[in-house]
Image: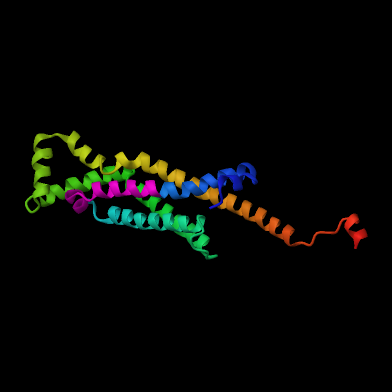
Amino acid sequence: MKSLTEHNKYGFVGNSFFWIKISLIVLPIITLIYSILIAAQQGNGLFKKSVGTAPIACHILLLIFCIASICTAILYNFHLLKFAILSYVHYIVTAIGILFAAICLMFLSPAAYYSSYNSVSEYANQFSSQDPQALTWVQYYNTTGNYYDAYNYVLKRTLRFYNPMKTLFALWLGVFFFSLVQGVYIDEKLSHETVEKEQPQEATPKEQSQQ
């Protein structure tokens, strides 16, 4: 990766591009950790049986593409592998990772929260005679009428993660977009510099007289 000093010659665009490269490593790491926390909460037996495995499967795919995005960003930016296609691979896996982050966000939304609560309640009432966890839900929440705890059980597996995940998604998407735009700008600058270096310089009048 070029140092901040090397990016200074491109002005504000160069400086911001340097920090955007760093962000494209840091943001997937944060998203990776946060997604693991969410998957751990949603992996609870009763919630998983009621809602299904789609949310967890989405988080697993997000984890995979977060790791791929981090690895390709490090390999590309630090020039550990010099393949022309590596930059394209990095942008592709990052775009797919952002897509899965958006899908995971849907599973944490207010609509998903109410849907998940209904699914858990229906499952518990239907299978309380077969599933000890469902029986516990029915005995505790339906018998005592303590709906606050019932809502909170689903809340901490869905809506509680929504705003932080939305912030991470927005930051990652914004940084990714600006990296594409600024990458094109700096590539054009580099190509112009390369052409200028390759062009033969004209001799000065003094050099011509000496010849």
Out of 204 and 82, give the one closest to the viewer.
Answer: 204
Q: In this view, does 184 lie to the left or right of 206?
A: left
Give the quadrant of the C terminus: bottom right
Please state the total of marks drawn on the protein image: 0
Out of 174 and 109, give the one closest to the viewer.
Answer: 174
Outermost residue toward the right?
209
Range drawn in magenta: 29-50
Out of 205 and 140, give the one closest to the viewer.
Answer: 205
Residue 122 covered by magenta stretch: no
Outermost residue toward the front?
210
Residue drawn at 26 percent across, 44 percent down: 157
Q: Can residue 173 be seen in this view?
A: no
Q: Can residue 123 be seen in this view?
A: yes
x, y (%) of residue 26?
Answer: 43, 47
Residue 31 covered by magenta stretch: yes
Out of 201 and 87, give the one closest to the viewer.
Answer: 201
